Amino acid sequence: MTYYKEFKYASEEYWKLNEYILSQIPITYSVIARREQIMSKQSELIGEHPKSGLFFDWCKHEDIPTTTTKKHRKLTNKGIDRDILIDELSSFILKHHISPLKVQQFEKKKSILNKHEFNTYVDRRMPFPVQNFTTQKGNLGEIILAEYLEASSKLEVVIFKLHFNPNIEQAMKGDDILLFDKQNISNKMIMGEAKYRGTPTKQVVMDVINSLSKDNLPISLTFVSDRLMELGEIDLSEEIDDLVDKVATDSIDIIYVGFIHSNEKVSVPIEAHLHNSDNENLVILSYGEENPNDLIEKSFLKAIDKMRS
């Protein structure tokens, strides 16, 4: 079997060639290790599961066998200490909602106000949702997805969009997350969508599939470019702005990642319905646990405590 042309990264032909190569490896004890060294299709697209850090300590992963349009990485809890996890997630909440300049402003006020006055000051200016649990669920899902993909793919979030939310109790419009290769902006990008459901259903899977259809392109590139310009990141801003045309002409690889956070049965509807996707560059990342609401509530309460301390 001979191939004389190059295949587009992650195209159907690309995966077929990978399957053919795998089929030629003899099934013997001596080559089991070689098979395991070959990346899963999930790893080809979003990188391998982190081998250190929070997500290594928190989650075990399973890259479930794939088809052309069904690529699912299932995350489950390894048994990390709950207080440690909540503390880490609360720090992520602060990082994604509060800019460094805003942190300096709070620190300045803390140095001149007594504890009661400072708590009142903070409570009136809380930079993340404290009343709308729906917004908390959505925001934390986006945050977990962004942090996971930075750890696995080595691409980066260049703008924390929640720093710019004019109404903290409401979800922001636009792409949930965008990640870029800062060393080569035109190399590839990741577009992500996060969903939370207390009970996983076919509908949430279809919602993610529809949001991350192969025909859906990122709509927040100009927002990212403008915010970078305002922050003085002129060169990076211009590189992101150039992507608008490259995306429109299909000149950059876009990896699509959906994250579904739910209970321990979250993988069931994903495995049953992900095949309906039309996007061979889509990976679904799932995380399920017994009481996901509790994790979200306590993580935001811990973030409030940190703001007041």
Image (cartoon, helix red, strand yellow):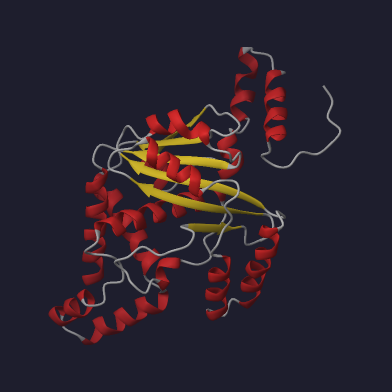
Taking the image as shown, residue 8 lies to the left or right of residue 58, namely right
Q: What percent of the width, then of the height, locates residue 164? A: 42, 73
- Residue found 21% across the figure and 80% down from its top: 121
Q: What percent of the width, then of the height, locates residue 77? A: 33, 37
Q: Is residue 184 visible?
A: no
Observer-nearest of 204 and 7: 204
- Residue found 59% across the figure and 41% down from its top: 279
Q: Residue furthest right?
A: 4
Number of marks in the rendered image? 0
Q: Residue furthest left?
A: 116
- Residue found 26% across the figure and 48% down from its top: 295
Picture quadrant of residue 119? bottom left
Observer-nearest of 112 and 252: 252
Q: Residue furthest bottom?
A: 112
Taking the image as shown, residue 10 lies to the left or right of residue 69, namely right
Q: What percent of the width, then of the height, locates residue 265? A: 32, 32
Q: Is residue 299 above or below residue 258?
A: below
Q: What percent of the width, then of the height, locates residue 43? A: 57, 38
Quadrant for the N terminus, please.
Answer: top right
Quadrant for the C terminus, please.
Answer: bottom left
Picture quadrant of residue 267? top left
Q: Is residue 302 visible?
A: yes
Q: Is residue 223 above or below residue 277?
A: below
- Residue found 32% across the figure and 65% down from its top: 170
Observer-nearest of 82 and 234: 234
Q: Is residue 29 above or below residue 36?
A: above
